Image (cartoon, helix red, strand yellow):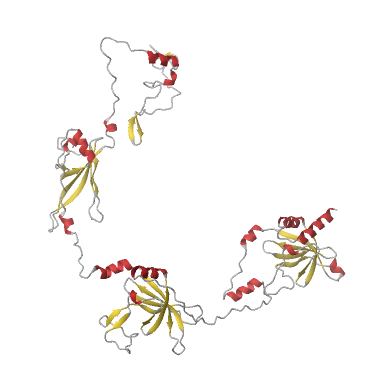
């Protein structure tokens, strides 16, 4: 009888208890995965065989093991320990034999064909002797393709036998679910594996051609004309490639004639020409840019006289002897198109490169005298005094006036920053001299407001004296006003506000801090006046 060492009781029924320290109840795994391969795990310390750790031996024990000679023992030698067992699903993991083959599908509903050859690929998995049959997918074939037989063990006969790798060889036929497959070739790994197992691999053979696929092959096109003059090739190679020339349409020798700029575009795709007129704003002409629609321009005709109305009647191909080609366009020359003279004076960069590569010609711009029409300068009427100057100016710039643009960065940086000054009226009236005003300058929008603190029993109603507005300096013009700023407000200076004169007498402490922080933009006289006022106040 043994006792339970964990509980100290005899090992009898009823005296066994569950180990309270145990937390793992799963079955331990003997295999681990490294880089996608399953390998047997090393024994854990304390379970089974514990590995010998070299650091646990002392130096004396290591010296004894190094100097100890083995003793000769008599009797039967001890057998070597058996090697570690590796299961088949580990040894043959991810090892697959690949065979190429085909099967013939009988066609019974078509009188034009008897069968079709459909190629397949056999995958034999050595891990569990399973086979998968896959047909390569052909786009737009109309046949359900892909995995024909999913991975499984295929039956060989009615006795319950299954196909083994020993039954697979080149030039052999196997019957699977009533379909006969013939193996034609295999990859290098399959061939080496069969040879290592003593199997003689047959010679590979070619897959027969499918008569239906051969019948659908279109023969190559034969061209009667040379390929250089093929319209299809010209369309494919020259599509979206346009030669652009800048020209002047000169008809100044006629009554009310003038010179008008145009753009001549030559489409290399079909050798057509289009002429577009360049319109300027407010030129008084109808907005029709196309002067000549896109068409092929005849250069020489057979029987057309000078009086033939080419602008009205069309000229057929039989009457045209030659059409305009890229070689007929040159910068600096005058060409006649439908009885009108066009002087080519410039072209774009693509056109220059095209002529340099194909005709070895380099074009340079020709200076021409363009008769500019008398441009009417826009005169802004004088300011009428209603609203702000910026709002009135917007009425002169557009039919629907837009609000003037604001400096939002300045508004965000100086939001709620106000400079406050104390002021009094500069007047000869004794009652008005005693009135005190608060002049506030808003740094976010450069506006000024004036407020009069109410005094009881003074006989004057206090409150808001001036709304927020921008005040121009005296002596500046209405069209170009100069507004008051922090650099103009010094203690003792006079500020004229719409014919009213105010004398600044004091300022708050924030004004002094702001002026000291921005002393580079503030005159020295303003800073000295503020410092003197501060020193006198401290006394």
Question: Which residue is the extreme one toward the top?
Answer: 74
Which residue is nearer to you in this view: 420 or 325? 325
Above or below, comparing residue 322 to residue 153 in the picture: below
Above or below, comparing residue 493 to residue 330 in the picture: above
Which residue is nearer to you in this view: 134 or 461? 134
Query: Can the viewer see residue 12?
Result: no
Q: Going 83% across and 53% down the picture, which residue do you hit? A: 538
Q: Quadrant of residue 458?
A: bottom right
Q: Going 15% across and 55% down the picture, which residue do you hit? A: 211
State which quarter of the image contains the N terminus. Answer: top left
Percent x, y of residue 272: 33, 75
Percent x, y of residue 378: 59, 78
Percent x, y of residue 434: 85, 65
Which residue is nearer to you in this view: 205 or 16? 205
Q: Going 85% across and 67% down the picture, which residue do you hit? A: 433
Above or below, comparing residue 88 to residue 395 in the picture: above
Question: Which residue is the extreme one toward the right?
Answer: 430
Q: Quadrant of residue 290?
A: bottom left
- How many discs mark residues in the rendered view? 0
Q: Would you say 264 lies left or right of 418 here?
A: left
Q: Would you say 123 lies left or right of 354 here?
A: left
Q: Would you say 26 lies left or right of 319 here?
A: right
Q: Going 69% across and 61% down the picture, which residue do you hit? A: 443
Percent x, y of residue 340: 39, 84
Query: Can the viewer see residue 93?
Result: yes
Above or below, comparing residue 537 to residue 187 in the picture: below
């Amino acid at each position: 009888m043994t006792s339970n060492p964990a509980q100290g009781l005899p090992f009898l029924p009823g005296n066994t208890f569950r180990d309270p320290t145990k937390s793992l109840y799963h079955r331990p795994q003997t295999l681990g995965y490294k880089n996608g391969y399953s390998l047997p795990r090393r024994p854990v310390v304390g379970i089974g065989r514990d590995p010998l750790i070299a650091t646990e031996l002392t130096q004396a024990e290591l010296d004894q093991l190094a100097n100890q000679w083995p003793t000769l023992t008599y009797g039967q030698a001890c057998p070597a320990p058996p090697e570690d067992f590796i299961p088949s699903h580990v040894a043959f993991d991810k090892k697959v034999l690949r065979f190429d083959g085909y099967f013939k599908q009988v066609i019974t509903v078509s009188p034009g064909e008897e069968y079709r050859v459909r190629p397949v690929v056999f995958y034999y998995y050595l891990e569990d002797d399973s086979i998968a049959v896959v047909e390569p997918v052909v786009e737009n074939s109309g046949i359900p393709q892909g995995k024909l037989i999913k991975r499984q063990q295929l039956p060989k006969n009615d006795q319950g036998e299954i196909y083994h790798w020993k039954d697979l060889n080149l030039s052999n036929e196997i019957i699977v679910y009533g379909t006969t497959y013939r193996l034609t070739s295999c990859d290098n790994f399959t061939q080496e594996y069969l040879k290592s197992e003593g199997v003689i691999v047959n010679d590979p053979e070619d897959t027969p051609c499918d008569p239906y696929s051969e019948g659908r092959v279109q023969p190559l096109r034969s061209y009667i004309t040379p390929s250089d003059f093929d319209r299809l090739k010209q369309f494919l190679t020259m599509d979206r490639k346009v030669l652009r020339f800048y020209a002047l349409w000169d008809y100044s020798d006629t009554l009310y004639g003038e010179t008008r700029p145009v753009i001549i575009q030559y489409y290399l795709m079909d050798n057509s020409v289009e002429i577009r007129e360049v319109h300027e704003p407010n030129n008084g002409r109808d907005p029709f840019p196309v002067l000549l629609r896109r068409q092929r321009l005849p250069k020489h005709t057979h029987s057309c006289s000078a009086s033939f109305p080419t602008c009205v009647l069309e000229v057929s191909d039989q009457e045209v002897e030659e059409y305009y080609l890229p070689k007929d366009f040159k910068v600096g020359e005058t060409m006649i198109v439908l009885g009108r003279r066009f002087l080519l004076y410039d072209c774009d960069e693509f056109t220059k490169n095209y002529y340099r590569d194909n005709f070895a010609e380099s074009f340079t711009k020709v200076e021409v005298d363009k008769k500019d029409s008398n441009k009417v300068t826009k005169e802004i009427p004088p300011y009428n005094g209603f609203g702000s100057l910026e709002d009135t100016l917007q009425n002169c710039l557009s039919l629907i006036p837009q609000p003037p643009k604001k400096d939002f960065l300045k508004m965000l940086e100086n939001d709620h920053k106000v400079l406050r000054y104390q002021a009094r009226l500069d007047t000869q009236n004794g009652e008005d001299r005693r009135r005190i005003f608060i002049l506030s300058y808003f740094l976010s929008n450069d506006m000024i407001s004036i407020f009069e603190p109410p005094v009881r029993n003074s006989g004057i109603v206090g409150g808001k004296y001036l709304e927020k507005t921008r005040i121009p300096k005296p002596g500046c013009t209405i069209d170009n006003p100069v507004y008051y700023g922090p650099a103009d407000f010094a203690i003792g200076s006079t500020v004229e506000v719409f014919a009213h004169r105010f004398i600044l007498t004091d300022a708050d402490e924030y004004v002094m801090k702001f002026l000291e922080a921005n002393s580079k933009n503030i005159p020295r006289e303003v800073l000295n006046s503020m410092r003197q006022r501060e020193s006198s106040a401290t006394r």
